Image (tube, grey):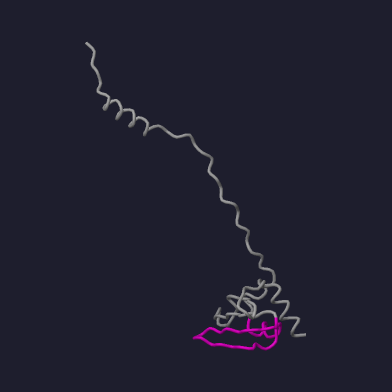
């Protein structure tokens, strides 16, 4: 005697078996490497004291105190540097530098540093 399997049961069984099957492994696409920005002269500015900045750029055109931190601003006709100093081991030191053009657009940091140094001499 032969038993017939209903078509719906056969379909469900096939789908369950297919779900258990392993898929061929696709090679994992690696994201392209993101180029890291070059610090250039900034490495010498981060961690610097206000005295080092004044020695390098001259007196700041703006000095803003907020709590225990200080923002010093240095300008040339081409760009502006904002240096943010925070207490580190009891001394105010540069933690971050921003550079921009007088219109507010981003400026290349190394070029801006050079422009302000040249404007001083």
Q: Position of residue 109 (x, y in %)?
A: 67, 73
User: Is residue 4 found left or right of 18 in the rendered image?
Assistant: left
Q: Quadrant of the C terminus?
A: bottom right
* Residue located at (67% from left, 74% from top): 44
* Residue located at (56% from left, 87% from top): 64
Asked whether 37 falls inside the magenta stretch, the response is no
Q: Position of residue 76 (x, y in %)?
A: 70, 83
User: Is residue 94 found left or right of 76 in the rendered image?
Assistant: left
Asked whether 75 falls inside the magenta stretch, the response is yes
Label count reads 0
Q: Which residues are magenta?
A: 49-77
What residue occupies the far right of the structure in this picture? 121
Choose between 85 and 15: the one closer to the eye.
15
Q: Quadrant of residue 19?
A: top left
Choose between 98 and 95: the one closer to the eye.
98
User: Is residue 61 found left or right of 86 in the rendered image?
Assistant: right
Q: Is residue 9 above or below residue 87?
A: above
Q: Position of residue 94 (x, y in %)?
A: 60, 78
* Residue located at (31% from left, 28% from top): 11
Q: Quadrant of the N terminus?
A: top left
User: Is residue 6 found left or right of 49 in the rendered image?
Assistant: left
Q: Quadrant of residue 96?
A: bottom right
Choose between 20 and 92: the one closer to the eye.
20
What residue occupies the far top of the structure in this picture? 1
* Residue located at (62% from left, 84% from top): 73
Q: Position of residue 47 (x, y in %)?
A: 62, 76
Q: Quadrant of residue 85?
A: bottom right
Q: Is residue 91 above or below residue 13?
A: below
Q: Is residue 3 above or below residue 52?
A: above
């Amino acid at each position: 005697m032969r038993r017939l399997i209903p078509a719906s049961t056969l379909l469900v069984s096939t789908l369950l078996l297919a779900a258990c099957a392993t898929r061929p492994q696709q090679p994992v696409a690696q994201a392209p490497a993101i180029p890291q920005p070059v610090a250039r002269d900034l490495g010498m500015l981060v961690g610097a004291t206000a005295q080092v900045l004044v020695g390098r750029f001259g007196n700041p055109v703006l000095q803003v105190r907020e709590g225990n931190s200080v923002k010093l601003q240095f300008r040339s006709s081409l760009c502006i540097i904002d240096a943010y100093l925070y207490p580190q081991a009891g001394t105010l030191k540069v933690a971050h530098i921003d550079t921009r053009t007088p219109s507010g657009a981003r400026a290349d940091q190394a070029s801006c540093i050079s422009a302000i140094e040249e404007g001083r001499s």
